[in-house]
Image (cartoon, helix red, strand yellow):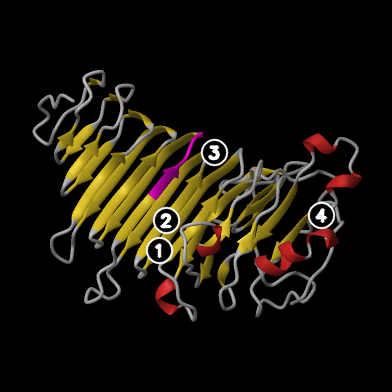
Amino acid sequence: MSRCRLAALFGGVLLSSMAFSAPMPVVNGLMLDPDGIHFKDSSFQHTAALPPLPANMTWVVPADSGYDHYFTSPVDALDHLSEWCALGDVIVPVRARCTLMIAPGTYDLEGDQQIIMHEKVDIIGMGPSSTIIRGFVNGSAWDETSAVLRGAADAALRNLTVANYVFLASTSGDHSSAIYNDGAGFRVNDVSVSVNGNDRNYGIINNGVDATYTDLDIQVTNIWDPSKPSALCFGFWARGPGSVEINRAEVVAEGCSDSTAIQDNGANLRLVRIHANANCPNGSCGANAVWNASGVLTILNSRLEGASRSITIGSDSDRIINTHFNGPVIDVFPGTQCRGTYGNSLGDVPC
């Protein structure tokens, strides 16, 4: 794998890691987006050329791109972090960050390789439809060993797709996920996730820490081989203590004997503008949009669709406001508060 340590400055200005999902001002009237450069005279240069980056940032590019001096695998770039990221050398290390930029392309990880993120090292793609990372990982447990990507404390993942093509994996194991996180302060924004084909499939597992997830598209299915039904499909699994917030997400779980779009086991989970959908395209199954097993839920302005249940309420402290239930509501807790909850006919649906 090719590698480099880029220390060039783009106009002497440090690029923020909050870039590339929309045109971003850089310097002297220039704007940068995934398609090229906007100049201050309103002209636009559509180019495949990658701009030079400041210190503590580097590119990952497709192997056939012709850029021999950049990394061609995100795994390789993170394995050689010290070659381009020097957090200890900056003046104010508490504010320092490194950023791995991933150019448009599809990146197939080799064998059962995993992307292991590092604290304060962000990973940014060029959009979920442009930067696609595909892994082939499974394991004997639901932990970090069965995930394509593992998050890290105070790190961000943005603007890309992470897929686990477990049906093509060369190793055995019942559990597979796309993203596993046990790092406090992990942030995910504008990310698509898909997992398909193992016995126990998970889109994202957040294990016991505070984290924020925004603008997600999660698909966890068993439609690759209906003759071998999977036991479990969880779209998002909030497991263990921690305050977890999901803002604006489409979460689908389908085709497993237990298909649950969002599962809460012990977290303080806040869902805002969520469409959670669990269904059974291959026949009968347990399909639950949201299931609170032992945590505390706050749900605002969402739509919950479950062929078996739209929601299972698990606490007197659950709060649900302005939310559409399409499916049965299971609530045995008298303290639950629902305000503005309604069904398909727009009639009130109490909790």
Q: CA distance from mark 2 to mark 1?
A: 6 Å
For marks 4 and 1 on the same chain, the one whose residue lies earlier in the sequence? 4
Q: Nearer the viewer, residue 227 or 247?
A: 227
Q: Nearer the viewer, residue 1 or 317?
A: 317
Kind of residue sitting beneath label 4:
Cys
For marks 4 and 3 on the same chain, the one whose residue lies earlier in the sequence? 4
In the figure, is residue 121 to the left or right of 332? Answer: right
Label 1 sits on residue: 195
Q: Give how far across and how far down residue 166 sits, in percent.
A: 43, 72
Is the Cβ of the residue at disc 1 closer than 8 Å to that at disc 3? Answer: no
Residue 21 against residue 241 in the figure, above or below: below
Label 2 sits on residue: 203
Provide the secondary structure element on which disc 2 rests.
strand
In the figure, is residue 68 to the left or right of 223? Answer: right
The tag on residue 211 is 3
Kind of residue sitting beneath label 1:
Val
Which marked residue is nearer to the observer: mark 4 or mark 2? 2
Is the Cβ of the residue at disc 2 closer than 8 Å to that at disc 1? Answer: yes
Which marked residue is nearer to the observer: mark 4 or mark 1? 1
Which marked residue is nearer to the observer: mark 4 or mark 3? 3
